[in-house]
Image: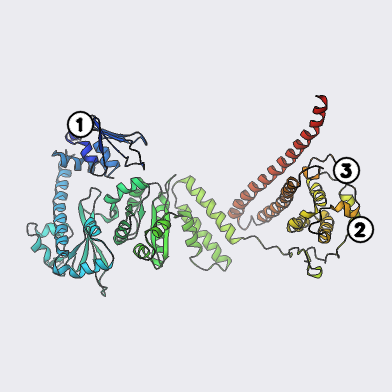
Amino acid sequence: MAITPQWKDELRARITLSSLVMRSVKLTRAGREFKGCCPFHGEKTPSFYVNDAKQFYHCFGCGAHGDAISWMVDHNGLAFMDAIKELAAEAGMEVPAPDPVAAQKAEARASLIDVTEAAQRYFVENLGTASGAAARDYLQRRGLSAATLREFGFGWASEDKQALPRALPHFGEDMLAEAGMRIVTDSGERYDRFRGRVMLPIHDARGRVIAFGGRILDKRDGVAKYLNSPDTPLFDKGRTLYNLHRAAPAVRQTGRVVVVEGYMDVVALAQAGIAEAVAPLGTALTEMQLEMLWRMVEVPVLCFDGDAAGQRAAMRAITRALPLLAPMRSLGIVRLPAGLDPDDLIRESGAKAMQDILGQPASLIETLWAFERDAQPLTTPEAKAGLKARLMAHADTIADPEIRSLYRRELSERFSAFAYPPRAQTAPRYQPSGGAQRGNWRGANMPPPGLSSEARTTLGKLMQGAQRQNLLIATLHGLALHPQQIRRHAEALVQLARHHPESADLIESLLELAETLDSHDPSTIWSQTGQPAPPADSPFAFLREGTEAGDACEELAEAVTLLVERPALEAALAATIARFENDPEGSFAEQARLRLQLAAVNERLKHFGRRKAAMAATDSETPRRAGTD
């Protein structure tokens, strides 16, 4: 029999929606309705309404809308059938079974839940007895409050191998074994699985106890520190996330889910006010657990201990996640300081330190790149080639073709930047003082201060506007008019001389003369050398009379920058093209990046010239129009 619309209508009719919602949201009566602050988005002014007569809730702030069933799904994080079953149990209704076999399995699971729930009550009671004194001391040393112990259901399993059959005599040995509470050996011996351990219940999404985790108090050789229930008809560790039933409502408030390595980490975070934490159960995150996390948020935050084991756990999670990546579906990775787990960090530095770290997760691709880059020394070409091979192998596991392509491209760019760093400039920088201390920036010492007759002649020829009206000459002409800017751009001018050998003599002359000027002398080179003034109708503002000094210097700096950037990019592009045969993928990616940068510089050059011309045209039109008027 299927769940029909009529059956669901009857279920809704038997549930008082406001009572259901008020278990987690404070509501006040507003006429025939109830109102409160919406649990699906943060707000201070109530805009969330519940209408019992119409059997729906609605938020006028975020648009959340639904009935009792959708409340259990969207707010409590239950699967649809789990929501149906929980509401039906509350309403006293039988859920229609799809077939007899399924009904039989459901009945068996329900019986086993009776076992685990009863075992949980026994463990909690046992913690308060004389047998649990050492466990209570241990939990107190860990700084866990009484409220935390109650919320998470801490208990104690004594050393007695036959404690459970005596404590739970109404359940048979077979049921105890099937629920994972007892071990049966090949010889037929039976004994309690959990002995001498602090016990924590593991719940399903509906909050029912389905399994247990136990921790020993003192380290013992050959004894596992943590022990979980085996897989049973109730419990599949690869499909279960510890604390999911408590974290789901908190995730809807914060928009974040934090995945830590173990359930004691979850407890420590919850006590520090971080309620949206879950943990896998003794294994690396499985594909099913990742899917469960992605149903909650787009980018779950994985938090790992700051040791080698934590780093390996992070990589295992990344390896599992890569094939499943999809648009707007990824992982954030947080690594704690070396040697610390969440509990240690919170004790040493407080909850805010933990919040700060969780607030700045690294991306999946950053973590992948850093792990493989640091995995082994990269001192030889072969080792670097191995790094690239590993990175591309990771990228190739991604099923989504667009994301796979983007990962290959970004990892290639990171590899190229790492393996082929920009080479250092071989020529020394220009040093602006000290005679013999000045740099040999062109392969020969600069002449003593003062312009030679040859340099003065070169300066005059190159500054003739009729010979070379282009940005290069205009800029050098501008520096001659504003010599106080020469020292400011000395290093850029040295680079410019390397890329434009035809201007090297003039640049050397400018640098020489800048040495002879008083730093507070406002005069120009023209007055020092007797050269003619620049043309008055220049389209460049820094060459026109009457331009404010600040504006002229700003535009002059822009021109110098553009002149240096373009040839530098062209040289880098040529070098990248030259290594295409040895590294086609890396070269291609770097070429694309450099071409984009070069296009941007060319666009700036184009607009720079147009803007200056427009300014000149406007200035020349103004007197004529004034005269006409």
Which of discs 2 and 1 lies nearer the camera? The answer is 2
Q: Residues within 10 Å of mark 3 (few under 14, many from 20)?
A: few
Residue 131 to residue 570: above or below:
below
Question: Viewer-proximal residue, 67 or 273?
Answer: 273
Quarter of the figure with residue 544: top right
Question: Which residue does the image show at 61% across and 50% down from the upper left?
Answer: 593
Question: Which residue does the image show at 37% across and 61% down from the upper left?
Answer: 350
Quarter of the figure with residue 70: top left
Question: Viewer-proximal residue, 265 or 274?
Answer: 274
Q: Quadrant for the N terminus, please.
A: top left
Identified by mark 3, the residue type is Ala
Return the residue at label 2: 454
Name, please, the residue furthest toward the left. Answer: 170
Q: Residues within 10 Å of mark 1 (few under 14, many from 20)?
A: few
Identified by mark 2, the residue type is Glu
Residue 357 to residue 605: above or below:
below
Distance between mark 2 and mark 1 Cα atoms: 101 Å
